[in-house]
Image (cartoon, rainbow, N blue to C red):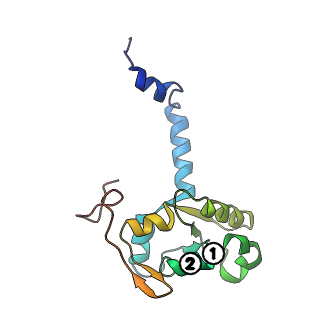
């Protein structure tokens, strides 16, 4: 069977997709390493013990500018020094930093994993927490912004994914 792939599509398919079994293994593994902002928010909003702690790995100035309510503040550079005082090894940790353009949460997750903690990285970081309309705290108090329609549903609670 011959298909006529457009020249534009050729740039996407020049390297063919992985075989389905390989793709399934990759995407399954990805879910073991990452958490979605809205899933983290829903777990925290449900009340009770969510089964994990949220860790903000940014500087004190960044933390003061805004952070997730209930998060633990532990800058990446201080994880090796302070993790044992701040975290329970039996409780999974979800790290976040500024956003998708920052790899601070990845570095924090690596540092924690190397110390023996179970860890996931929250995709989108603080940027997407705010853009999706979830409440946050600053050094001045609580704040909440309207959801950005490019990142979150504005007419319902479920994006369908």
Residue 114 x %, y % = 74, 63
Q: How busy is the neighbourhood of tag 2: few (under 14 within 10 Å), some, or many (20 plus)?
A: many
Count of marks, rendered view: 2
- Position above or below: 136 against 108: below
Left or right of 54 on screen, residue 149: left
Residue at image coords 68%, 68%: 117
Q: Which mark is residue 63?
A: 2
Using the numbered discs, state the Cα–Cα distance from disc 2 to disc 1 in whole angstroms. 6 Å
Left or right of 4 on screen, residue 116: right
Which residue in the rendered view is the most extreme toward the top? 1
Q: How busy is the neighbourhood of tag 1: few (under 14 within 10 Å), some, or many (20 plus)?
A: some
Left or right of 161 on screen, residue 84: right
Residue at image coords 32%, 67%: 147
Left or right of 100 on screen, residue 74: right
Is label 2 in a helix, a strand or a loop?
helix
In the picture, which quadrant includes the N terminus? top left
Which residue in the rendered view is the most extreme toward the right? 81
Q: Which mark is residue 76?
A: none
- Position above or below: 29 against 129: above
Q: Which mark is residue 59?
A: 1
Foreground pick, 121 / 146: 146
Residue 68 x %, y % = 48, 76
Residue 54 x %, y % = 55, 73
- Position above or below: 7 against 49: above
Image marks 2 and 1: residues in contact by CB distance under 8 Å: yes
Which residue in the rendered view is the most extreme toward the left? 155
Foreground pick, 115 / 126: 126
Residue at image coords 58%, 59%: 102
Residue at image coords 48%, 80%: 49
- Position above or below: 135 against 132: below
Residue 134 x %, y % = 38, 73
């Amino acid at each position: 069977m011959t298909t006529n792939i457009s020249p534009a599509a050729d740039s996407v398919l020049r390297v063919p997709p992985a075989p389905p079994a390989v793709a399934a293994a990759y995407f399954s593994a990805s879910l073991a390493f990452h958490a979605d902002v809205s899933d983290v928010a829903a777990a925290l909003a449900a009340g009770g013990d969510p089964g994990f702690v949220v860790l903000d790995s940014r500087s004190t100035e960044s933390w003061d500018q805004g952070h997730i309510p209930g998060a633990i503040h532990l800058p990446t550079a201080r994880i090796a020094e302070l993790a044992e005082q701040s975290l329970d090894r039996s409780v999974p940790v979800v790290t976040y930093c500024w956003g998708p353009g920052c790899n601070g949460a990845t570095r924090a997750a690596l540092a924690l994993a190397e110390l023996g903690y179970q860890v996931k990285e929250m995709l989108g970081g603080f940027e997407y927490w705010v853009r999706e309309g979830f409440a946050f705290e600053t050094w001045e108090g609580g704040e909440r912004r309207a959801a950005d329609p490019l990142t979150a549903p504005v007419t319902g609670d479920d994006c369908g994914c």
